[in-house]
Image (cartoon, helix red, strand yellow):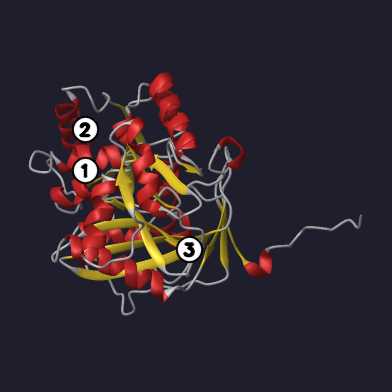
């Protein structure tokens, strides 16, 4: 392929994971990394790295253009929701290819309340959700969601389960929201309250081109990174994940993405949880980027999803005859300060000796 790529967020975990997937799929790629944090950038595994202005700096568009022109970049790949939104608004000014959904799709998916309302209005399973207007209005939300024993309190925007916690009473929800208001200055209106979904937790990643599903993979999160540091004891960042065959999850995710735009293109990473009846429901859609745990989708199965993303973005042909690429019995283990490990179920206990207690 010999393409030249520019990746945002280089040096952070998601950026290095993506570079690992790309190099595994095509060693001929020349990868340029950029980041506004020089310390993360020091850990980047890209071929060349640039320290850039933060997203809020008015010079950033010009900085990116100069890097793209100097490095003869073919494709710019955003690696966070913030980068996706920023570049989505610059797509006519960037002198290289971007592979993003429509700007309206990006904006909708980055507001969890509006997204869920949009999906539910079209008959697509998603949790009943209410916005928090102020801390005093929480009682009414609990009344409307009764008799559920607990609700899910989280922020309307953001990723990584920021500000998320299960709550059993209006008092708990109010205390949590006021804590964020008092310590971090986050207003109550930044939160939403949803029905709590107690079932299995899935990630579904897919690639689309002009309204056609090209490739999709699914995994189930079995545990989470740093659960002791998360009041919710859960996160969208899985520690142990397992590649699974779940056609019902794919069906719901595909219906949701098609409802966003009949000519949809780009990458979509969807969070799905089962409700009390085992029905998969959409909780979040990260539009325009691959997930931070993309290695499990790239390094298992027949097709490397990161490489397929690049080929689609560059207008190159892809030979995929079955869009649902299932690689069952593969696991991915992630932890802080380690490279994600991919292994087959038969390798789980290789080199391990159990000591009887």
Answer above or below: position of 343 versus 14: below
Give the Cα distance between marks 3 and 1.
32 Å
> What residue is pinned by disc 2?
67
What percent of the width, then of the height, locates residue 249?
Answer: 39, 69
Q: Residues within 10 Å of mark 3 (few under 14, many from 20)?
A: many
Tell me the element at label 3.
Answer: strand
The residue drawn where x is 15% and y is 61% is 261
Q: Quadrant of the N terminus?
A: bottom left
Q: For residue 69, say whether it is visible.
A: yes
Give the Cα distance between marks 2 and 3.
36 Å
Tell me the element at label 1.
Answer: loop
Q: Looking at the rendering, which quadrant does residue 337 occupy? A: top right
Sequence-wise first label, 3 or 1: 1
Tag 2 and tag 1, C-beta contact below 8 Å: yes
What percent of the width, then of the height, locates residue 336?
Answer: 57, 39
Q: Is residue 334 left or right of residue 38?
A: right
Q: Is residue 164 left or right of residue 100?
A: right
Q: Quadrant of the C terminus?
A: bottom right
The residue drawn where x is 22% and y is 37% is 71
Q: Front-most of 266 and 272? A: 272
> What residue is pinned by disc 1?
73
> What residue is pinned by disc 3?
219
Please tell me the numbered disc located at residue 260: none
Q: Looking at the rendering, which quadrant does residue 312 occupy? A: bottom left
What percent of the width, then of the height, locates residue 133?
Answer: 28, 35
Q: Residues within 10 Å of mark 2 (few under 14, many from 20)?
A: some
Tag 2 and tag 3, C-beta contact below 8 Å: no
What percent of the width, then of the height, locates residue 25?
Answer: 40, 59
Q: Front-most of 266 and 287? A: 287
């Amino acid at each position: 392929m010999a393409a030249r790529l520019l990746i945002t967020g280089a040096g952070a975990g998601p950026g290095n994971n993506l570079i690992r997937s790309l190099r595994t799929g095509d060693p001929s790629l020349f990868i340029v990394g950029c980041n506004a944090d020089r310390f993360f950038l020091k850990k980047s595994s890209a071929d060349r790295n640039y320290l850039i202005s933060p997203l809020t700096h008015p010079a950033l568009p010009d900085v990116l253009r100069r890097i793209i022109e100097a490095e003869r970049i073919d494709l710019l790949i955003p690696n966070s929701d913030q980068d996706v939104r920023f570049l989505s608004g610059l797509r006519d000014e960037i002198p290289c290819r971007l592979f993003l959904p429509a700007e309206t799709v990006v904006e909708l998916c980055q507001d969890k309340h509006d997204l869920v309302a949009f999906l539910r209005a079209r008959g697509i399973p998603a949790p009943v959700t209410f916005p928090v207007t102020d801390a005093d209005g929480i009682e009414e939300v609990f009344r409307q969601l009764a008799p559920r024993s607990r609700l899910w309190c989280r922020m309307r925007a953001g990723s990584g389960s920021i500000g998320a916690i299960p709550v059993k009473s209006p008092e708990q929800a109010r205390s949590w929201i006021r804590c964020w208001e008092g310590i971090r200055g986050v207003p109550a209106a930044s939160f939403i309250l949803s029905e709590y979904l107690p079932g299995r937790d899935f990630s579904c990643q897919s690639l689309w081109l002009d309204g056609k599903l090209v490739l999709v993979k699914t995994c189930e999160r079995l545990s989470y990174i740093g659960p002791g540091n998360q009041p919710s004891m859960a996160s969208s960042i899985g520690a142990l994940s397992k590649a699974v065959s779940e056609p019902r999850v794919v069906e719901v995710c595909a219906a949701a993405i098609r409802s966003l735009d009949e000519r949809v293109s780009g990458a979509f990473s969807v969070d799905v949880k089962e409700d009390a009846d085992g029905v998969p429901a959409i909780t979040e859609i990260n539009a325009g980027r691959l997930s931070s745990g993309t290695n499990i989708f790239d390094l298992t199965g027949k097709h490397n999803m990161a490489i397929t993303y690049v080929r689609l973005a560059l207008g190159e042909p892809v030979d995929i005859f079955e869009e649902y690429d299932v690689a069952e019995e593969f696991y991915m283990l992630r932890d802080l300060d380690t490279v994600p490990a991919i292994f087959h179920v038969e390798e789980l206990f290789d080199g391990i000796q159990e000591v009887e207690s």
